[in-house]
Amino acid sequence: MKLEIRGLTKRFGSFTANDAIDLTIEPGEIHCLLGENGAGKSTLMNMLYGLLDPSEGEILVDDRPVTFVTPADSIAAGIGMVHQHFMLVPVFTVAENVMLGREQTRGLGVLNRAEAAARVRELSERYGLRVDPDRLVEDLPVGVQQRVEIIKALANDAQVLILDEPTAVLTPQEIDELMQIMRELKAKGTSIIFITHKLREVKAVGDRISVIRRGKVVGTASPDTSEAELAEMMVGRSVKLTVDKDAATTGEVVLDARGVTVVDPRGHQVVKDVSFEARAGEVLGIAGVQGNGQTELIKSLLGLVRPAAGEIWLDGRNISTHGPRESLEDGIGYIPEDRAHDGYVGSFSVRENLVLDLYRSDDFSRGPALNREAIAANARSRIEEFDIRTETADSPVSSLSGGNQQKVVVAREFSRPLKVLIASQPTRGVDVGSIEFIHKRIIEERDRGTAVIIVSTELDEIFGLSDRIAVMYDGRIVGTVTPDIAREDIGLMMAGAHEPAEGGAA
């Protein structure tokens, strides 16, 4: 199936999100759509999927103009979409999710779950997706949930599959698996529109790369194009793809975790007797495949969960019983891994979110009343300093792109004096220009004497930022090493299969 876009434009009031875009998706190709967050990639795809009406332009399928009023029209034309935020019902099984909207029944209106399960098994085997149709979605890892979304699209006979930022929530191993799935889909004739901002991924899997900047297609490239050239096309300027930093000047221990154990609501130990020190003026990276206790460990440091055993000390004070408000007031900054759940209030304005944990301070309040002028002035300053792309400071954060939502969280946490900065997946879902900026600010915070703890599943980020790296596996720190360790060795440590090589320990 050939899909063509001619002059497609989308305006929201005076704002033009897509400006006369032309694209052609050939049958059986992986066409990568590369661009910064807020460049207009998702808006374009939402028009292709019938979620938005174009202001101008046309869409053609096999040279025939089509109009998509609803997603059902797009699905009927052979287009499927896997959204960045999955559209699954957690308490339903895989088979039940796949049959939603196309339920088949047998006798007296009873759902034919057996037929749905058989369809899932058939698609799983054909495309190497390996999904159990009888498992509850809420019990599946994120990477497997994504496979369920792909199966949903294929069950509707999708010939063009749109993957919107599909790797934003995946571990390196899951990303490799997704790349292989994409190649298998292509080999069987499915066209794929792969939306991303990750340069390494488009070079690894793409046949053609179209770059969008501020709503316009600014060029088409081949996978042979260098990462530096692609980054410059995306951002409109040259971008440093490596972190510039001097050797750390390490000071005293600021945060000291001693034998921390965390038990989840089901009674399982998810953090097991973890001890480490974070010193002033250093970045301690915590590496590991997601799901090995990193999230729960960080929550215990913030007071979001209470350790079942062990102690947490900050500047010589035991803060093990402190809650989140006390931890923030103690001088701990926090960039959470799930910004939508823990980082901002979507219905609140950008202005309000920028003081979400600061509004009690004398800078932003006068007794029981908020100092709205100071809050507005703070917003103007932070929006400019952090290049937050928003129509106004009064726009709800939910209206921003994912990368700009992350910038709001980062701007807020960097706007107060910190003893410790804890950044969990700080650049997840963020484009190369913003990654460069956030990394620079993290190193600047380190150089001010702040103890910085970075949790990331991106090994490039861990190696680029860290002065020491603690590796977690199965709820434990299995070793602490220096960034000169071989990538293969740290990968084995992350899998629980290797001790740090001599000389790599820290």
Image (cartoon, rainbow, N blue to C red):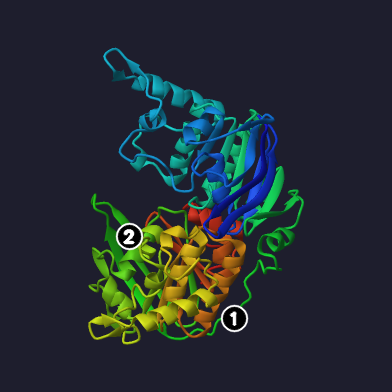
Separation (CA) of disc 2 from disc 1: 32 Å
Residue 48 drawn at (x, y percent): 57, 40
Q: Earlier in the sequence, mark 2 or mark 1?
A: 1
Q: Quadrant of residue 87?
A: top left
Q: Nearer the viewer, residue 63 or 453?
A: 63
Q: Is residue 262 left or right of residue 233?
A: left
Quarter of the picture holding the N terminus = top right
Residue located at (67% from left, 60% from top) = 234
The answer to whether residue 124 of the structure is visible from this angle is no
Which structural element holds mark 1? loop
Amino acid carrying label 2: it is Lys
Residue 434 drawn at (x, y percent): 57, 67
Q: Is residue 229 left or right of residue 126?
A: right
Q: Is residue 474 left or right of residue 201?
A: left
Q: Looking at this rendering, what residue extends furthest in the top direction?
A: 107
Q: Is residue 472 left or right of residue 205?
A: left
Residue located at (35% from left, 34% from top) = 135
Amino acid carrying label 1: it is Ala
Dot in front, 2 or 1: 1
Q: Quadrant of residue 60?
A: top right
Q: With respect to residue 293, does 160 lie above or below?
A: above
Residue 401 drawn at (x, y percent): 50, 58
According to the picture, the residue beneath numbered tag 1 turns out to be 247
Residue 465 drawn at (x, y percent): 56, 71
Neighbours of disc 2 within 10 Å: few (<14), some (14-19), many (20+): many
Residue located at (49% from left, 48% from top) = 84
According to the picture, the residue beneath numbered tag 2 turns out to be 272
